[in-house]
Amino acid sequence: MKNLISHKANSFSESIIRGMSRVAATYQAVNLAQGFPNFSADERIKQAAIEAIQKNINQYAITWGAKSLRDAIVAKEKRFRGRDLNPETEITVCCGATEGMMATMMAVINPGDEAVIFEPFYENYGPDTILSGAIPHYVKMYPPANDQEDWHFKEEELAAAFNDKTKVIIINTPNNPTGKVFKKSEMEFIALLCQKWNVLAVTDEIYEHILYDGETHVTMANLPGMKDRTITINGSSKTFSVTGWRVGYIIAAPLFTEAIRKVHDFLTVGAAAPLQEAIAFAMGLPDDFYQHLSEDYQKKRDFLLKGLKEVGFKTFKSRGAYYLIAEIPEKGFASDYDYSIHLAKEAGVATVPLSTFYLDHKSAGMIRFCFAKKEETLQLAIDKLKAYRQVKV
Ligand SMILES: Cc1ncc(COP(=O)(O)O)c(C=O)c1O
């Protein structure tokens, strides 16, 4: 019989992360599942969006991004990363890092090309490879033995994943879900492999400004030999707490930017014009805005870490991004997915099962908490977990 659904669409399932937000709504659970803040974005940024609409910036922006935003991206990259970029040939504004990754993959992947991806991986990378036609090659990241260590990969396993067919490696630092911040030595090792095998590094740097305990963000494009073989994906969602605005961007050498802009244009035409103006404004906010971002999130991380420990969860300390992974402290559940559903229903706290960040979706025995929430929300979640655990223990 004729199959009216494409093989591609049939090869992946709906997002569990976004699905858990719906589960949270069903059970009226505190939503610590999907990664978005429940506090307000900075008033100045909201005001800039209102003003842009009032100034009638309401029609299509230039497809690859309003000049004001491309200039702001160039200025921000110079300020924080010391990069010299050309806004005319190296920047593409798109609808979130989500579209950025898809447009990039569709612009560079040919049938049979392989993509190296660290596992656990941000859920979207799976469908990104399927829709672009890349063959994924997953390389394991191992959990740390204690809080002094970070998640790590084995160099020999990574090296073995590269071959003549490898086209890209996707690196997400700071990392979702692990909170890992890739060290300079790790990035240098990856850079050498990229050069040896003529591979592009596609770096998802959406959490670049959310770092804890003095960690620093390493920019792959700044490592020797990497400027022209790095495609940097970034966006406004996390830095400016506006996940619903859908403004992201891609930085790439002119050859790649040209291809990416074509794909982007026919995928979405462009990101919301007035919101591009507001993000251009936001990027120019003084340094203290960026400092507070990390400081405020570090307080939230520590608050949740303490609370989860009190409740009896063994946690992994994140070094960046805004998630915490915890081991499931109870036995008797067929999967971490079942446990997440149970926790949402019985404790009233929604989380994400870690198995969704693995290819085989097998239970990892862990769940992910998002702490981009008001302190009172985190407190409520801890209170609910305490009440639930007391009932159970
Ligand atoms: C690693 C990573 N990349 C990309 C995104 C999505 O970014 P955007 O909202 O810009 O599409 C997320 C959102 O959670 C993420 O965690």
Image (spheres, rainbow, N blue to C red):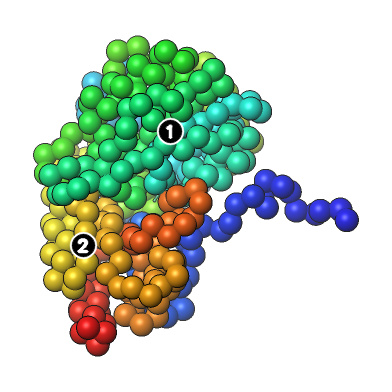
Taking 85 as reference, is 62 above or below it? Answer: below
Q: Position of residue 120 (x, y in %)?
A: 39, 46
Which residue corresponds to the image point at 38% horizontal and 57% vertical from the top-left?
Answer: 364
Three-letter code for the amino acid on which mark 1 is drawn: Ile
| The N terminus, quarter of image | bottom right
The answer to whether the beta carbon of the residue marked 1 is less than 8 Å from any atom of ligand 1 is no
User: Residue 75: which numbered mark, if any?
Assistant: none
| Left or right: where 170 falls relative to 287 | right
| The C terminus, quarter of image | bottom left
Q: In this orientation, does residue 261 appear? A: no
Q: Mark 2 points at which residue?
A: 314
Q: How many labels does the image show?
A: 2
Q: Nearer the viewer, residue 163 or 250?
A: 163
State the SS at label 2: loop
Disc 1 and disc 2 in contact, CB within 8 angstroms: no
Q: Position of residue 148 (x, y in %)?
A: 12, 44
Q: Nearer the viewer, mark 1 or mark 2?
A: 2
Taking 60 as reference, is 315 above or below it? Answer: below
Q: Position of residue 112 (x, y in %)?
A: 63, 27
Three-letter code for the amino acid on which mark 2 is drawn: Lys
Q: In this orientation, does residue 152 appear? A: yes
The earlier-in-sequence mark between 1 and 2 is 1
Q: Name the residue under label 1.
A: 170
Taking 217 as reference, is 349 above or below it? Answer: below
| Left or right: where 323 falls relative to 307 | right
Q: How crowded is mark 2: few (under 14 residues within 10 Å), some or many (20 or more)?
A: some
List the single residue furthest toward the bottom: 391
Q: Position of residue 295 (x, y in %)?
A: 13, 49
Which residue corresponds to the image point at 41% horizontal and 19% vertical from the top-left?
Answer: 194
Measured in 3D between alpha carbons, the distance from the residue under mark 1 to the one under mark 2, in whole angstroms, is: 29 Å
Specify the quadrant of the image occupied by residue 37. Answer: bottom left
